[in-house]
């Protein structure tokens, strides 16, 4: 039964994790908006969600040529391929962060995160109603 519950919430759980990671990336972009040479980064959310649900990785595995090599500690939850964002208006110092665009992306991602939480809460409420109704 718990396996069915896991499957029932898998899409929302994965979406929340990806949205959280994307929020961190966008926040990092905003924090570095005045850092010379900083390049804004992001990832394709829909492709990442599809790959995560299919159990695929976007990165190539690292080859170990010696048994003493250590595993790479990846903060990235789904081994995503994070890419540089397309420059809108690069600055003279090489920074590609557009604060207005980043703030809009931050707000959009927050709204979508909140919508996913609301949808998940509705699913939980429906399950609780189904279990308690007679």
Image (cartoon, rainbow, N blue to C red):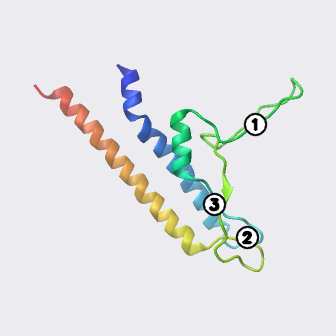
Toward the viewer: 62 or 121?
Answer: 62
Is label 3 in a helix, a strand or a loop? helix
Tell me residue 129's x, y (percent).
19, 33
**Which image quarter: residue 41?**
bottom right
Tell me residue 88's x, y (percent).
64, 74
The residue furthest bottom is 92
Is label 2 in a helix, a strand or a loop? loop
**Which image quarter: residue 99?**
bottom right
Tell me residue 86's x, y (percent).
65, 66
Q: Residues within 10 Å of mark 2 (few under 14, many from 20)?
A: some
Mark number for residue 35? 2
Pointer 1 residue: 72
Q: Is residue 36 left or right of residue 57?
A: right
Q: Which of marks 1 and 2 precedes in the sequence? A: 2
Q: Quadrant of the N terminus?
A: top left
How far apart marks 3 and 2 lie (CA) works out to 11 Å
Mark number for residue 6? none
Q: Residues within 10 Å of mark 1 (few under 14, many from 20)?
A: few
Seen at 76% across and 36% down, the residue is: 72
Check the image and report above or below for 99 versus 106: below
Q: Residues within 10 Å of mark 3 (few under 14, many from 20)?
A: some
Pointer 3 residue: 28
Seen at 55% across and 71% down, the residue is: 101
């Amino acid at each position: 039964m718990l396996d069915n519950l896991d499957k029932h919430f898998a899409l929302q759980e994965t979406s929340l994790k990806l949205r959280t990671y994307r929020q961190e990336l966008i926040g990092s972009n905003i924090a570095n908006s005045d850092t010379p040479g900083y390049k804004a980064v992001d990832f394709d959310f829909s492709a990442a969600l599809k790959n995560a649900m299919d159990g695929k990785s976007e990165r190539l595995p690292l080859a170990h040529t010696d048994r003493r090599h250590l595993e790479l500690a990846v903060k990235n939850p789904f081994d995503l391929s994070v890419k540089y964002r397309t420059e809108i208006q690069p600055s003279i110092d090489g920074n590609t962060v557009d604060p207005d665009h980043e703030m809009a992306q931050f707000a959009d991602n927050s709204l979508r995160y909140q919508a996913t939480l609301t949808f998940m809460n509705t699913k939980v409420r429906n399950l609780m109603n189904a279990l308690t109704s007679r």
